[in-house]
Amino acid sequence: MELVVKAADDKRAEDIVVLDMKGISLVADYFVICHGNSEKQVQAIAKEIKDSAAENELHIKRMEGFDQARWVLLDLGNVVAHVFHREERTYYNLEKLWGDAPSVNVDTIIPTQG
């Protein structure tokens, strides 16, 4: 999860949120949610996550939405990254949908966020 957060932050992803999904979802232990302000930035964030995973010998099980760059989903097994375009993030509002999931303090991972 830290690798995904750092990779997203490296490409200036905005409003990075980590939801602890343990006991709430069978899909993953963590959801990392962030957004970019353009299709190019969304793709850059997703590519950085993919490249960082590969460098650390982590397998991306699935990546969807990269070409459209409106909502890119990267499945790393116990972590699912959701990289949104700003408008789609507001529309889908995953943080509210999974409102019962506790947030992880990303400031401990990337202290300079903000």
Image: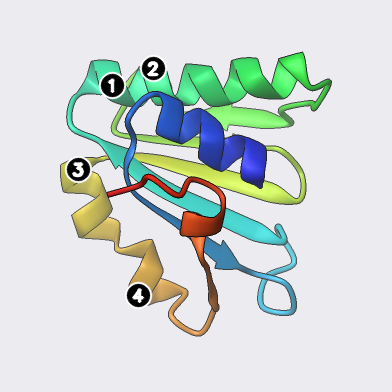
Q: In this figure, which colouring scheme has been used for the structure?
A: rainbow
Residue ID at (53%, 42%): 5
Residue ID at (49%, 57%): 106
The one of 88 and 21 positioned closer to us in this rendering: 21
Q: Look at the numbered disc 2 and give the secondary structure of its residue.
A: helix
**Percent of width and height locating residue 67:** 37, 16
Residue 41's tag is: 1
**Badge 2 density bin: few <14, some 14–19, many ≥20, Cα 10 Å:** many
In the image, residue 17 sits, relative to residue 109, either above or below, namely below
Left or right, residue 1 beside residue 7: right
Q: Which residue is mark 4?
A: 96
Of labels 4 and 2, earlier in sequence is 2
Residue 86's tag is: 3
Q: Look at the numbered disc 3 and give the secondary structure of its residue.
A: helix
What amino acid is found at the position of numbered circle 1 in the picture? Answer: Gln
Identify the residue at the far bottom of this view.
Answer: 100
Identify the residue at the far right of this view.
Answer: 57
Of labels 1 and 4, earlier in sequence is 1
Cα–Cα gap, marks 4 and 3 = 16 Å
Q: Look at the numbered disc 4 and give the secondary structure of its residue.
A: helix
Q: Look at the numbered disc 1 and give the secondary structure of its residue.
A: helix
What amino acid is found at the position of numbered circle 2 in the picture? Answer: Ala
Cα–Cα gap, marks 1 and 4 = 24 Å
Q: Which residue is mark 2?
A: 44
What amino acid is found at the position of numbered circle 4 in the picture? Answer: Lys
Identify the residue at the far front of this view.
Answer: 112
Residue ID at (73%, 16%): 54
